[in-house]
Amino acid sequence: MSLSSHGFASFSAFKAEHYLFLWRITLRVKVCLEELIAVNVVIREFKPEDYYEVYKLWKLTKQVALDRKWIYELKAKRQPDLFLVAEVDGKVVGAVVSTYDVQFSHVHHLAVHPDYQNRGIGSLLLSEIERRLKARGCLGLLITVNKRNPRYEEVLKFYRKRGFRVIGDYTHVGKMIGRKEDMVKAYGVKEKC
């Protein structure tokens, strides 16, 4: 009995359809697993009382962690909907901070506690930030990945899987334009601005 007698034009056509079907099943299973794994995760806006937990999280995951509570509070006050935390059973296990710009917004920090990584929490945080930025009319999203990060390749893979691509190799330059007193307070900078 040939495949053509069952409505298939050729074996190769059957094979292609078969793989497409398997891909759809795999995709559905993956989505269901991510939903199951992250079912008890609550994504919410940062509150001042989260400061020490977020600070410890960023320090633990080798993110820039400024021991200046007022900076985090200022970020949360200026754009509260773009400073999010992820909670599991009331414990802060992830955080993301972004700033809005109509052309390209920037994710400054995204971190998930090592004990909770690979459970979809980082994806949930990133998806929620993307949703909020898109609702504001943002056209693109930039994320800086430090090449000195020991997990550089793993981090790139995470972002690529979510549709990001490497768009350049940049050297960041900076200039302090705020009041000297604020710079000293924020960063402990004592040299001339």
Image (cartoon, grey):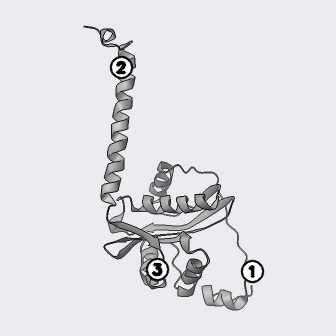
Q: Position of residue 143 (x, y in %)?
A: 58, 60
Q: Which residue is mark 1?
A: 177
Q: Amino acid at mark 3?
A: Tyr
Q: Amino acid at mark 1?
A: Ile
* Near-viewer residue (44 or 157): 44
Q: Which residue is mark 3?
A: 55
Q: Secondary structure at mark 2?
A: helix
- Image quadrant holding the N terminus, namely top left
- Image quadrant holding the C terminus, namely bottom right
Q: Earlier in the sequence, mark 3 or mark 2?
A: 2
Q: Earlier in the sequence, mark 1 or mark 2?
A: 2
The reply to whether the C-beta atoms of the residues labelled 3 and 2 are less than 8 Å apart is: no
Q: Earlier in the sequence, mark 3 or mark 1?
A: 3
Residue at image position (61%, 86%) is 186
Q: Which residue is mark 2?
A: 14
Q: Secondary structure at mark 1?
A: loop
> Farthest residue toward the front?
135
Establish if 170 lies above or below 93: above
